[in-house]
C-alpha cells in the first residue's frame, strides 16, 4: 500500500506541474490581451478589463494584422493541399507500383527534412529576386511545399501500407488504370490519412519563420509569425496588449484544432518524424 | 515487404508509370532543396558581396571562417545551448510520457494539453516569453519574488547567463511536447506483461523504471535525442525574436550569424557559415537514419 501512495503523490505532482508548465504562458497571453495594462503584475498598476486590444488590432490599419493572418492562411493552406497531393502520388508509387530503390527514395526524402534552413535561404533569396517573386505568395508557397513534402510523404506511405492489396486487385479486374486506382480506390479510402497529413503540413507551414522573414518585405505577403515578431509601437514602446490580442486570435484556432484532432496529430508526428 | 526479392526486373512501361507518379515530388525537392544546397556550396567559394564584382576565391571564405572568433563563439554557444536544452527536454519529456502512459482520468485531454506549446508558432510564443521575462512587470520575476526564490528580480534578457537560461526554458517549453509524444509511443510498445511480472516479483516501481522501462525505451530515447539535436543546432526563430542574439552577441546561434551576413548582402561568407552548419547537421542525420532503422520499419 505504501508504494501505491507514493505513486499517487508523484503522479499528481507531475500532472499538476505538466499542466501548469504547458498552459501558464498561454493563459498569461490571453489574460494580458484582456488587460488595459500589460504591466498589471507590478504593484503600481492595476488590471482593468478591456476588449480594446482586440478592437485595436482590427481597426488600426497600420498594424496590418488582418493582412498577415490572411496571407498565412492562404500560403499555408495552398502549400498543405498541394504538398499532400504530390506526396500522395509519390506514396502511391512507392507502396503500390514496381519501382527500384524504394527505401533509398524514402530515406533520401527524410534526410532533406533535416537540412538547416539557413543553408537554403541564401540561394533561394537570389532565385526569388531573379524571378521577381520577392514579397509575393509564390515565393513562400513553392519552398513551403518542398519543405513539408518529406513529412507528408512519410505519413502517407505508412498509411497506404496498411490498406489491403486486394483493393488494387479488385480494381484491376474491373479494368481500372493505375491513375484510376489511385483516385477512385486508394484516395477515398485513405481520407483519414490524407487529412492527418494535410493538418500537420498546414501547422508546419503556418509556423515557418525564416523563409517568410527573408522573402517578404511588407504586409502584401508577410505571414503572421513574422508580422507579430516585428510588431512595433509608434514611439518605440512595445504594444504588448495588441501583440497578445493578435497572438490570441492566431493561436486559439490552432489550439482548438489540436484539441479536436489530437489523435491524428500524434499519429502523424510519430509516423512522419520518428519510427523508433 | 514491397521489395519482392524474386522480382528484380521491371518492364520499361511499369517503370515509366511509377516514375511519373514520383516526378512532382522529385522536381520540388530538386528545385527548392537540393539545388539550393549545391548553390550554397558553390557560392561559398566566391566573394559574393552586393555591389562588388563576383570573384572565385577558392577556400578563402573558409580560411576567414576558421580564424573568425565570432563564428567560433556562436558555434560554441549553439552546441552548449543544444546540450543544455535537449537534456532538459529529455528529462521533462520522460516524466510527462511516463505520466501519460498510466491510466488517468482525462488522459486524452492531458495529451492534448501537452501538444499546445508545440502547435503555437515559435515566433509568436517567443513574443509571449519576451513579456514573461520583462524585468519590471513580467510573470517570471513576479513568480520568483512571490514564491521567495529570490529577493531581487532577475535581469533575464539583459545579462548573458539570464538570456541563456531564458532561451533554454522557452525552447524546452516549445519542444518538450514533441519529445513526450515520441517517448509515449515508445512506452506504449512495451508489453504490459513484463511490468506485471516484475510486480509479482515485488520490484519497486523505481526499480522497474531503471531495470525494465529505461533499457527497453533506449532505442526510442536515442532517436528522440538525435532528432532534437539536429533540430536544435539550426535554432533561429526563437533567438531572433527573444534575444536577437543579445546581449552583445552572447546568445547568437550559427543560423543567426549566417542570416546576418545574408542580410548585409555578403552571400559568399554567409554561405560558408551555412555550409559548416549543414555538414554537421547532415552527418548527424545520416547517423539518425542509420540508428532509427527507418527502412526496416516501413519496407
Image (tube, coloured by chain):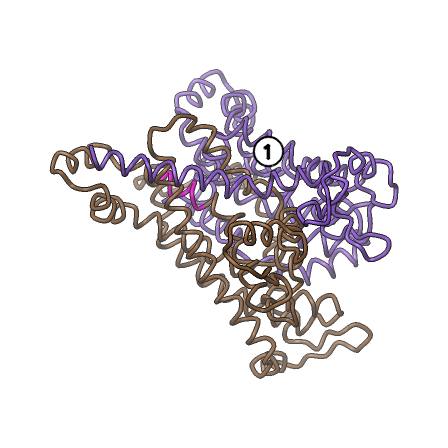
The vertical placement of A139 against A83, above or below, is below
> What's drawn in magenta, residue-wise?
B179-185
- Chain represented in brown: B
Q: Which residue is drawn at 27% across and 38% down?
A: A6
* Residue A169, quarter of the rendered image: top left
Left or right of residue A140, residue A165 in this image: left
Callout 1: few (<14), some (14-19), or many (20+) C-alpha neighbours within 10 Å? many
Q: Mark 1 points at which residue?
A: A255
Give coordinates of residue A160: x percent, y percent. 45, 31
Q: Which residue is drawn at 19% across and 36% down?
A: B194
Q: Chain A is drawn in which colour?
A: purple
Of helix, strand and loop, which mostly describes the magenta segment?
helix
Task: Tell me how many marks there are.
Answer: 1
Which quadrant holds the N terminus of chain B?
A: top left
Left or right of residue B110, residue A137 in this image: right
Taking depth in this image into account, of A219 and A248 the one nearest to the observer is A248
Taking depth in this image into account, of A261 and A15 the one nearest to the observer is A15
Q: Which residue is drawn at 46% across and 36% down?
A: A157
Give coordinates of residue A135: x percent, y percent. 80, 50
Q: Which residue lies furthest to the left in this view?
A: B201
Q: Which residue is drawn at 60% across and 29% down?
A: A256
The vertical placement of B96 against A260, above or below, is below
Answer whether residue A252 is magenta in the image.
Answer: no
Amino acid at each position: 500500500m505504501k508504494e501505491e501512495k507514493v505513486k499517487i503523490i508523484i503522479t499528481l505532482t507531475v500532472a499538476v506541474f505538466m499542466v501548469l508548465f504547458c498552459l501558464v504562458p498561454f493563459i498569461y497571453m490571453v489574460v494580458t490581451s484582456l488587460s488595459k495594462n500589460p504591466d498589471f503584475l507590478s504593484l503600481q498598476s492595476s488590471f482593468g478589463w478591456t476588449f480594446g486590444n482586440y478592437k485595436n488590432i482590427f481597426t488600426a490599419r497600420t498594424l496590418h494584422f488582418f493582412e498577415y493572418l490572411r496571407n498565412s492562411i492562404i500560403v499555408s493552406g495552398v502549400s498543405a493541399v498541394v504538398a499532400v497531393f504530390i506526396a500522395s502520388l509519390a506514396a502511391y508509387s512507392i507502396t503500390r507500383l514496381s519501382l527500384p530503390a524504394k527505401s533509398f527514395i524514402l530515406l533520401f526524402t527524410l534526410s532533406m527534412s533535416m537540412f538547416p534552413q539557413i543553408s537554403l535561404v541564401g540561394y533561394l533569396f537570389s532565385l526569388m529576386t531573379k524571378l521577381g517573386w520577392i514579397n509575393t505568395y509564390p515565393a513562400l508557397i513553392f519552398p513551403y511545399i518542398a519543405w513539408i513534402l518529406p513529412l507528408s510523404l512519410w505519413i502517407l506511405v505508412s498509411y497506404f501500407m496498411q490498406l489491403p492489396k486486394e483493393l488494387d486487385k479488385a480494381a484491376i479486374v474491373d479494368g481500372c488504370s493505375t491513375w484510376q486506382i489511385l483516385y477512385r480506390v486508394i484516395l477515398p479510402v485513405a481520407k483519414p490519412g490524407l487529412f492527418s497529413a494535410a493538418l500537420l503540413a498546414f501547422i508546419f507551414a503556418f509556423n515557418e519563420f525564416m523563409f517568410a522573414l527573408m522573402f517578404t518585405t511588407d504586409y502584401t505577403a508577410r505571414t503572421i509569425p513574422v508580422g507579430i515578431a516585428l510588431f512595433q509601437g509608434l514611439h518605440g514602446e512595445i504594444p504588448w496588449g495588441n501583440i497578445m490580442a493578435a497572438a490570441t486570435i492566431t493561436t486559439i484556432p490552432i489550439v482548438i484544432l489540436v484539441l479536436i484532432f489530437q489523435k491524428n496529430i500524434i499519429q502523424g508526428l510519430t509516423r512522419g518524424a520518428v519510427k523508433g | 515487404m514491397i521489395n519482392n526479392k524474386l522480382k528484380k526486373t521491371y518492364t520499361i512501361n511499369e517503370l515509366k508509370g511509377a516514375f511519373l507518379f514520383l516526378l512532382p515530388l522529385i522536381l520540388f525537392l530538386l528545385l527548392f532543396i537540393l539545388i539550393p544546397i549545391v548553390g550554397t556550396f558553390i557560392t561559398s567559394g566566391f566573394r559574393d558581396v552586393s555591389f562588388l564584382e563576383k570573384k572565385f576565391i577558392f577556400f578563402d571564405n573558409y580560411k576567414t571562417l576558421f580564424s573568425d572568433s565570432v563564428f567560433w563563439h556562436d558555434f560554441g554557444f549553439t552546441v552548449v545551448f543544444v546540450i543544455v536544452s535537449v537534456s532538459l527536454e529529455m528529462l521533462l519529456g520522460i516524466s510527462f510520457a511516463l505520466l501519460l502512459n498510466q491510466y488517468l482520468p482525462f488522459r486524452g485531454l492531458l495529451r492534448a494539453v501537452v501538444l499546445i506549446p508545440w502547435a503555437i508558432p515559435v515566433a509568436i510564443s517567443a513574443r509571449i516569453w519576451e513579456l514573461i521575462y520583462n524585468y519590471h512587470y513580467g510573470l517570471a520575476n513576479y513568480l520568483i519574488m512571490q514564491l521567495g526564490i529570490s529577493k531581487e528580480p532577475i535581469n533575464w534578457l539583459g545579462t548573458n547567463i539570464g538570456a541563456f537560461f531564458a532561451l533554454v526554458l522557452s525552447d524546452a517549453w516549445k519542444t518538450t511536447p514533441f519529445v513526450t509524444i515520441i517517448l509515449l509511443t515508445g512506452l506504449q510498445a512495451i508489453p504490459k506483461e513484463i511490468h506485471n511480472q516484475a510486480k509479482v516479483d515485488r520490484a519497486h516501481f523505481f526499480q522497474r523504471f531503471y531495470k525494465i522501462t529505461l533499457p527497453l525505451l533506449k532505442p526510442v530515447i536515442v532517436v528522440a535525442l538525435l532528432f532534437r539535436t539536429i533540430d536544435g543546432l539550426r535554432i533561429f526563430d526563437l533567438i531572433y525574436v527573444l534575444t536577437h542574439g543579445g546581449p552583445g552577441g552572447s546568445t547568437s546561434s550559427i543560423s543567426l550569424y549566417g542570416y546576418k551576413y545574408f542580410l548585409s548582402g555578403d552571400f559568399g561568407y554567409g554561405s560558408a557559415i551555412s555550409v559548416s552548419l549543414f555538414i554537421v547537421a547532415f552527418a548527424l542525420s545520416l547517423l539518425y537514419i542509420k540508428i532509427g532503422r527507418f527502412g526496416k520499419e516501413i519496407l
